[in-house]
Image (cartoon, grey):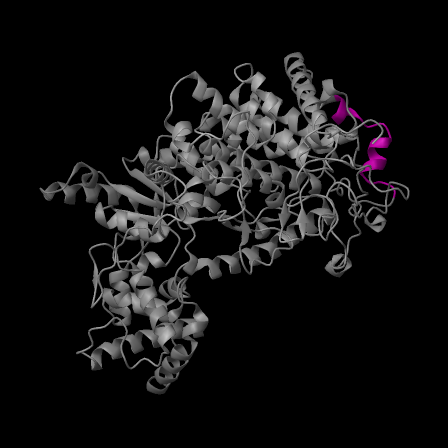
Amino acid sequence: MGVKGLQSFMERCCPEACVTVNLREMARQHVARSQQDCTSSANTTRPTLVVDGMACLRNWYSCKDWVCGGQWREYMDVLKSWVEAFTSAGIRLVFFFDGVVKEQKRPEWVKRRRRVNGEISKIFRHMKTHGEQPGRELFCLPSGLATFTSFALRSLGQEVFSSVQEADYEIASYARQHGSMGILGQDSDFIIYDSAPYLSVAKLRTDSLTTVLYDRQRLCRTIGLAVTQLPLLACLLGNDVVSKEKMQHIRNDAMATYRLNNPASHYGAPQEQMVLAVSHLVSSLWGREEEETGLIPQCLNLSAPHKELLKMGICSYLLPGQEAPQQGDISSLPPAPAFEKHVSPEILKACREKHVAVEDFMVYCVVWEGVTECSNTLEDEEDTELLPQALVYKPCRQLIYGLLLLHGHDGSSVNLPAIREWFVYPGNPLREPDMVHPVPVSLPCDQPSLDLLWFGTGPEVSALRLTCFLSIFDCQELSELYGAVEDSLLAALCLITYIVLQVQTLSEEDLDAYLSQAVCLRLKSPQELRQIELPFLSSRAVQLGSLYVRGLSHLLGANCASGCPLPSAALMPWHSFDGRLFHSKYLLAHSGVDKTVLLEGDSSCLSQFLCLREKLIETCRKRGRVLQSRPMAPEQSHKTAPGTGFRGRHAGGDESWRERGEMTQGHQHGGGRWGRGEARGDRSEYEDRERPWEGGGHRGGGQHFHLHSYPNFYDGEPPNVSRPPKHSRGRSYHNRGRYRLAPRWSQPPAPGT
């Protein structure tokens, strides 16, 4: 996130360094300068903005709805318009996205994830209290937005890169190397890098193509430093490498000296005074130690570990070709691959190339880094029924790891590789990664090598790729539909089947909601999807929407590992999911509407829906998973008078919204939530509530449900949860002994069980 307090200091105390610029005019001047330079190449002549994609996500996602899982088709339209604003002005765009999280920044990553967890808790409390999306002050990006945005921009013909080092470093390096006209982002680290001018995306107006340029040269003149001294200033103030706490004593001493020498100075707020104080310190160090040749002036009162940390922080700002004193050129190749012994050199090379070109997901991080991570997901920490998405998809990740790393393995547990997983989910303190071992994929033949899957040709290899992909999600029977239905619909059916198999509390109504929205989506324009009105929001449906989108990223990872049997475009959310559409289908399905209404009276959609539904139910039945009907009753709204909640209003005969198969604004009363019945109130009510997937209890049998969690309905009976057979031969998946996932059943239950 950059240097603590530096950007606000520039805005308040150094306004002459914050210059409003017109990007069209900047582009024209850039071309003129480049044409005068006879050594310029075509790429440096053309005005290019290097864009920090991660910093733009909040600006790009301007869709009204953000809690239901994402308005992906509407979002695609936003991206198209944004790109066209620049290309119409002759400006070339090059996008970078974070491809890895370096371990030196892991503590900061964890700190941010924990903070967002608190914000997500507030979001769910608001929805359960008011039945509506909270205001923008609690805005949270839809799950998977960063992953799918990079693919979206590629589909729009843009140049997109995924980093193998720190993304900020690669952005600054690219911009400097290619003579770019600027870096568009929102990170004060770009002031510190001696690279192209830093332009603010937060201040950007696409209608006029104006924004604010933060001028590092003018900043340096104001604070009395050279550009080469900015890295030390950044580290002493605190950044993502050198935490603010580690250099606190240095800043305290600097502030004391500054106030002693400037008793009449009242230059801004304390943080702004701190920037000036530390700047004076840095300037004085070099002023009285001209013989100093190292990165760190010796007079700084630092322990050896802190000195090494400070040196690492300073070096992180030095770009290729920029030499640090006594250090040489610090640019270096990525470290050796974590699992290079398990794959061929050709796979390693292809892995890295695909990752950089945004043609891969998950595979590079596993093979090269030995680690995968997943940021926050909209999940209710007070939920007692739905398994966190990280654990729902853990079995398929283990099979992906197995496909990547276990070719030729003898099947023993000796020397089995382990992948470090940093996945955010309720109950995970993120103190250390989960160590997850790969599991071999069950195939009718020996497990193929990655070289065969990735580089092989012929119909047999194509069929093998599809078999591997479907086996990861335990739905091999769906191969019969390959070529008979759209690829995106086959992918959706595969994912829904997997979710139903893994989440034992899913009902027929949930299945109908998932499947009907996938079938109906192809009929909808972005405008029609925007106009869907919801009578209220169900927090359970919100979590199920996020669960689905997270599953799409796992489909993408499995597809990449299997040699891409399906085109990546078929796995993108704008082809199979819309949050508002899913939410409306969820409310309709749980209200008991006829299937014809659920499919909006379209006979073709209804026929396809029934066919796919039958195939899915048959696949699940073979594995001992029998879906039950369990409509979720809506809670009475806290915003309506007693007796006038959602249930009472519709019980009175106002069924028009259900008969039409749509949601209308006339019922938007802020009603409650479907299917839980948790009491509102302070978080302490939930602190001692046991989760059905925690402890030693099996996910299928021995589940513990607390009847006080369902006070409004069920009449003293626990929910009708489908239980797996007692005598099954499936395997359980563990997570440090606290969570267990639903087993994969290898045979249907015996009669009478």
| Nearer to the camera, 576 or 119 | 576
Residue found at the very far right of the displayed protein: 715
The total number of labels drawn is 0
Q: Position of residue 426 (x, y in %)?
A: 64, 52
745 vs 84, left or right, is right
Q: Can residue 663 be seen from the camera position used here? A: no
327 vs 263, left or right, is left
Q: What's the magenta region?
A: 643-659
Residue found at the very far left of the displayed protein: 38
Q: Position of residue 115 (x, y in %)?
A: 56, 58
Determine the residue positioned at 20% across, 41% down: 44
Q: Is residue 650 magenta?
A: yes
Q: Quadrant of residue 675?
A: top right
Determine the residue positioned at 38% across, 66% down: 9
Q: Quadrant of residue 258?
A: bottom left
Determine the residue positioned at 46% across, 38% down: 404
Q: Is residue 734 above or below residue 561?
A: below
Q: Quadrant of the N terminus?
A: bottom left
Q: Is residue 702 above or below residue 531?
A: below
Q: Position of residue 138 (x, y in %)?
A: 59, 52
Q: Quadrant of residue 474?
A: top right
Q: Quadrant of the C terminus?
A: top right
Q: Can residue 593 be seen from the camera position used here? A: yes
Q: Is residue 719 magenta?
A: no
| Nearer to the camera, 136 or 727 | 727
| Nearer to the camera, 161 or 142 | 161
Q: Position of residue 569 (x, y in %)?
A: 46, 27
